[in-house]
Image (tube, helix red, strand yellow):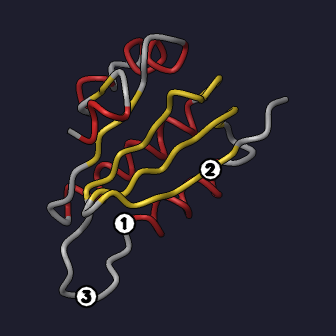
Amino acid sequence: MDVLEMTRRRHGETVVVSLAGELDVDNVSKVQRCLDEAVEPAEPESRVPRLVVDLSALTFIDTTGLGVLVRQLAALRARNGTMSLVAPDGQVLRRLRRTNLAPLFPIYDTLAQALA
């Protein structure tokens, strides 16, 4: 079983969280915590950052992983924030499409496109 690796970095007002490996019930709480921390404002009055979740190195995502993405999107929208995904053609994008979740997110083929 692949271990999930997470990295977080800032590009101006955009925060990029990259996930690599498998996102499933065993590590979904760590991912939720990472995403929550990524968009936590430094000060109460500061703008909610734009979040890009790079799934291009993700080899597997289950329904709990999809759920964490949807919950994060809803939380950001409630705070007037935005969230987009990087999911080139592959298993993750097919899963998003099969579950009818793809229309909820702006989805890009590359990180460069998502940051443009």
Q: Amino acid at mark 1?
A: Val
Alpha carbons under labels 1 and 3: distance apart = 12 Å
Residue 90 at x, y = what percent?
51, 11
Residue 38 at x, y = what percent?
44, 64
Residue that label 2 marks:
6
Residue that label 3 marks:
44
Q: Nearer the viewer, mark 3 or mark 2?
A: 2
Neighbor class of circle 3 (other Cα within 10 Å; few <14, some 14-19, many 20+) is few
| Left or right of residue 109, residue 34 in this image | right
Q: Amino acid at mark 3?
A: Pro
Q: Nearer the N terminus, badge 1 or badge 3?
A: 1
Q: Amino acid at mark 2?
A: Met
* Picture residue at 32% right of the left edge, 78% below the top: 41
Q: Would you identify the image quadrant in which residue 75 lies?
A: bottom left
Neighbor class of circle 1 (other Cα within 10 Å; few <14, some 14-19, many 20+) is many
Residue that label 1 marks:
39
* Picture residue at 39% right of the left edge, 31% below the top: 86
Up the image or down, 110 lies above or below 24; here it is: above
Residue 17 vs residue 23, the one in the foreground? 17
Up the image or down, 85 lies above or below 11; here it is: above
Where disc 1 sits, the SS reads: loop
Outermost residue on the right side: it is 1
Specify the quadrant that holds the N terminus: top right
Where disc 3 sits, the SS reads: loop
* Picture residue at 28% right of the left edge, 47% below the top: 83
Q: Nearer the N terminus, badge 1 or badge 2?
A: 2
Residue 57 vs residue 106, the one in the foreground? 57
Alpha carbons under labels 3 and 2: distance apart = 26 Å
